[in-house]
Image (spheres, helix red, strand yellow):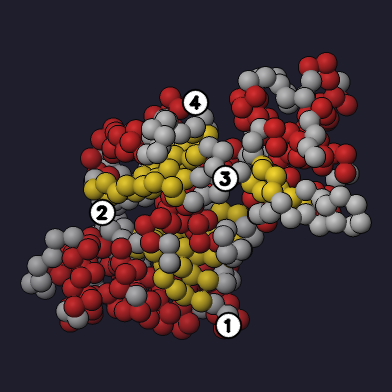
């Protein structure tokens, strides 16, 4: 693909290549300002970016021409004409997302700022395999991508898929998932290649962590997803901590502290004594059955807890303590400002959270817990898809990819130096 400059500049000289790189970087950086801060004037962009007025004017012109920013009223004046103000045009296109869990998935069409526009929930078992589950995603998107007012198909700029297992992020595939039978190495990104846009595959807990951290400017956060299984996502200094192979934060299959002093229960991953074997939704169903309490699914466990069933409440409190033990070392090592809990079991509220707090405050360093908050997420079922949309938008608008997007919009290499905006 041709670089985002007029063709005569695209030579092999070092100076020309630096100019191409600078243009992409400047556009990506300026667009990132609008994504982070919202409404900005030309003066705001100049002062925040440190770029010259001429450079900012050309880059704003390119973004405006592509429909990525819109001019609005209300600029400041220093005695002359008021400075134009701009804002991200969040409705310019959509991002298709699907948050896949163990027993269900949420599919949503989001705007460019991550806000869900239309969504649906589908009951499905992840153990049915990728073709069955991703087929459900295809079917849901086929309906959601049709605008209910105009009946026209939405313009898709990216696809984001979250799965409940370790993800090799660069390759867009699951690697050795403990519970996702048949998914190991499956080319999830390739499944959606027909859209002709970037496809992001992410761990579900990571996507929820971004949704919790980004809008509220929380730079140091641990997100726990507690449902049928258990996962965690880490966002520190504004970045997802994935580790070298994408396995960072997977506390569900670390060894539970309780396993050292009680029966080492078998886990679905094939090991014994995992955190999930004591605190996962499937484990609570198993233990309730053993106690003679009939329950069919995780929603039923939550219902029993809310009704005050003594055995269900006891097991939920134990689950909270097991989770607290598992995350306590992370708190001491990473010093997060907050732990946010989502997933079906989070609906049990303080009955679960009290156990988490108990163990974290007992076992973590006092300085690390001095201002720590432990709370239930307020995003509900949208946490995963919102985070996916934001992560996918990061990829679409990144400095090394923004020229691909702008050329696709324009249908030709865009002459940035000729672009201006009043």
Q: Comparing marks 1 and 2, which lies closer to the viewer?
A: 1
Which of the two labelled residues, at mark 1 and mark 2, occupies the earlier sequence position? Answer: 2
State which quadrant residue 399 falls in.
top right
Front residue of 247/342: it is: 342
The answer for how far apart the CA atoms under marks 1 and 4 are is: 48 Å
Please tell me how many numbered marks the rendered image carries. 4
Which of the two labelled residues, at mark 2 and mark 4, occupies the earlier sequence position? Answer: 4
Which of the two labelled residues, at mark 1 and mark 4, occupies the earlier sequence position? Answer: 4
Front residue of 108/220: it is: 108
- Residue beneath label 4, please? 196
Name the mark on residue 370.
Answer: 1
State which quadrant residue 145 falls in.
top left
Front residue of 104/291: it is: 104
Tell me the SS state at disc 4.
Answer: loop
Q: Comparing marks 1 and 4, which lies closer to the viewer?
A: 4
Measuring 10% from the left and 71% from the top, which residue is drawn there?
A: 293
Is residue 370 toward the left or the right of residue 10 in the image? left
């Amino acid at each position: 693909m041709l670089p985002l400059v007029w063709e005569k500049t695209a030579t092999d000289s070092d100076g020309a290549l630096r100019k191409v790189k600078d243009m992409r970087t400047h556009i990506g950086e300026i667009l990132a300002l609008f994504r982070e801060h919202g409404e900005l004037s030309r003066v705001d962009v100049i002062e925040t970016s440190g770029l010259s007025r001429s450079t900012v004017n050309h880059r704003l012109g390119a973004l405006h021409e592509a429909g990525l920013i819109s001019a609005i009223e209300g600029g400041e004046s220093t005695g002359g004409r008021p400075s134009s103000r701009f804002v991200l045009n969040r409705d310019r296109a959509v991002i298709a997302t699907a948050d896949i869990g163990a027993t269900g998935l949420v599919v949503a069409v989001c705007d460019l700022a991550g806000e869900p526009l239309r969504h649906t929930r589908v009951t499905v078992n992840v153990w049915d395999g990728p073709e069955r589950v991703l087929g459900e995603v295809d079917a849901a998107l086929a309906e959601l991508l049709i605008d209910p007012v105009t009946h026209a198909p939405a313009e898709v700029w990216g696809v984001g898929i979250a799965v409940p297992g370790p993800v090799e992020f660069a390759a867009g595939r699951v690697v050795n998932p403990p519970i996702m039978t048949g998914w190991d190495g499956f080319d999830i990104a390739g499944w959606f290649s027909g859209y002709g846009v970037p496809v992001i595959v992410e761990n579900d807990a990571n996507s929820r962590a971004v949704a919790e951290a980004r809008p509220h400017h929380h730079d140091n956060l641990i997100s726990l997803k507690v449902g049928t299984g258990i996962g965690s996502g880490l966002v520190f200094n504004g970045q997802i901590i994935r580790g070298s192979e994408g396995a960072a934060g997977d506390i569900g299959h670390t060894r539970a502290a309780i396993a050292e002093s009680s029966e080492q229960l078998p886990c679905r991953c094939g090991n014994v004594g995992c955190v999930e074997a004591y605190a996962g939704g499937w484990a609570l169903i198993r233990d309730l059955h053993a106690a003679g309490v009939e329950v069919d699914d995780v929603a039923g466990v939550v219902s029993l807890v809310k009704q005050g069933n003594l055995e269900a409440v006891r097991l939920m409190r134990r689950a909270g303590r097991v989770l607290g033990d598992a995350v306590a070392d992370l708190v001491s090592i990473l010093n997060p400002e907050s732990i946010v809990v989502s997933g079906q079991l989070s609906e049990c509220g303080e009955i679960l959270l009290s156990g988490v707090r108990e163990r974290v405050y007992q076992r973590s360093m006092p300085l690390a817990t001095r201002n720590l908050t432990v709370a239930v997420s307020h995003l509900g079922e949208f946490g995963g898809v919102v985070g996916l949309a934001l992560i996918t938008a990061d990829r679409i608008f990144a400095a090394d990819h923004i020229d691909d997007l702008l050329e696709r919009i324009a249908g030709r290499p865009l002459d940035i130096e000729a672009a201006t905006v009043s």
